[in-house]
Image (tube, rainbow, N blue to C red):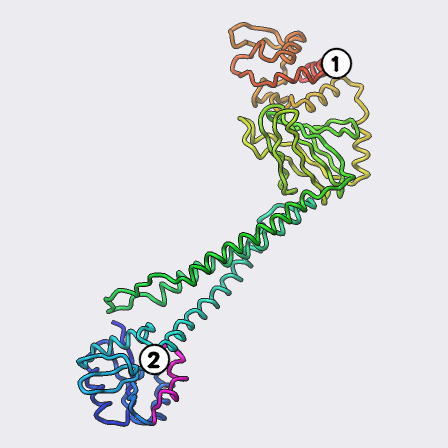
Amino acid sequence: MEKYSVLIVSRHPLFREGLARLLADQPAVEVIAVVSEWAEAQALIARRRPDAIIVDHDEVQLQRLDLEPLLWAETEGLKVIYVTLAGNEMIVHERRRVTNVTAEGLVQVMENSKKGKGLPKDLLRRYRMNHLVRVAVLVVIVTIAVSAFLDSIPLLPLQASAQAVPIDNLFGPHLRVISFLFALILVFLVYSVIAFRRRPGETGDGDHIEGHTGLEIAWTIAPLATVLFFSYLGAQALAETRRVDPQAMEVKVISQQWSWSFEYPQYNLTSTALNLPVNRQVLLKLTSKDVIHSFWVPEFRVKQDALPGEDMVKELRITPTKVGKYKVRCAELCGTSHAYMESPVVVMEPAEFENWVKEQSQLPTDPVERGKNWSAQFGCTACHTIDGSVVVGPSWKGLYGKQETMADGTTLTADDAYLIESIRNPGAKIVKGFNNIMPANVAGQMTDDQVKDVIEYIKSLK
């Protein structure tokens, strides 16, 4: 059981000796001294640091006004109990009466005093304020520590576009608020468990609190104001990412299961890699040939869905700021090979970009090279590999001249006629073990010469 160390101060022998005897048999109380002079009491307080001091309130030399600055400072738990006797009653704090003077009653007063119960209003406010000050200091310390820890972690990928700047700037305030809320909850919880825990020997219930109107109003208004503030910051960031540059370069982004292709109308080029000049805004116009896809380069931060349909073109503006190689990923679940729907993104210096445009403008004279380019441009390599592995469709390695077993059990030779039919009418003959998932509109996009070039490329894959 926790013991309360008590110092009794009174110039009246009967008063101080009577209290000492009253408390002598109490296991929860240890009377460390009984003194008559305040100077002696001050020395004992400095040396022994008692939990409580019982003061004879009728003693002229020990006026409450003089003792209050020291005794109610709550230094190391120091508490004072003013006591006077009136007939057969004990009066504590002038207004609180404990009838039938008993040691148990006085111990209960000390317990309540230690918890801040039964105190005058001004002292009760001071008692509560001390707790709030401690909690506030701890909340500030924990907030700073958590915020510093989060700042030390590389939470985001490389920042490589002008649009990424306002987006990343939103993370700073968010992390500060998250750190504060975490500290607020953690500190109040831990502090309450430690400071207001049930002590050994305590059997009563805790205070019953109905509510606090001011507090409820505060924690309604504060979150609302916070949300509105972040909404304003978010609107500013969104406007910044959509800032229009009249000199932006247009690139058409065509998505399909499970590949990307990029058209440059200004240069009459098509590529399976997104090549961009640094520090120049690019207007991406996104479409899909089949299902919903989503264009996303993590280093650029922004992303946009690509929807099927000619009238469903979506726009996205990007201004690359760092030369390097990245990847465009599909951020919308779009089928069995969704995870492999990637294409390279190359950000280069303007002069290097112009050289790339010149090289791409020269069509190869070798039909095999042209077929390789066409197969990449029309997304053939998204389903057909050239190394013998199987992803979605049959591999092109060693395909030409091979005997293929169809889904209906017939056997065919993979010759020119078979390959042309498979491109022009994908559902006519399906190889056993595969499904008819090849886009039917591919044939309408390829010329006869392009189909012949692709077949020459297939022939070269021995």
Reading the image, the residue beneath label 1 is: 449
Where is residue 24? Give x, y as percent: 20, 83
Residue 305, given in percent of the width and then of the height, sits at 61, 33
Left or right position of 90 against 136: left
- Residue 97 pos. (x, y %): 24, 79
User: Looking at the picture, does residue 419 appear above or below residue 200?
Assistant: above
Rendered image quadrant of residue 243: top right
Q: CA distance from mark 1 to mark 2?
A: 98 Å
- Number of the label disc, if any, that sits on residue 79: 2
What residue do we see at 61% from left, 29% from top? 307
Residue 44 magenta: no
Q: Which mark is residue 353?
A: none
Q: Quadrant of the N terminus?
A: bottom left
Point 21% across, 92% down: residue: 14
Please state the extent of the stretch shown in magenta in the rendering.
61-77
User: In the figure, residue 22 lies in which quadrant?
Assistant: bottom left
Q: Could you tell me which residue is drawn at 32 percent across and 74 percent down?
A: 114
Q: Nearer the viewer, mark 1 or mark 2?
A: 2
**What amino acid type should be assigned to the residue bearing mark 2?**
Lys
217 lies left or right of 302: left
Neighbour tally class for label 2: few under 14, some 14-19, many 20 plus, Cα within 10 Å: many
- Left or right position of 442 against 42: right
Question: Which secondary structure type mostly characterizes the magenta part of the structure?
Answer: helix
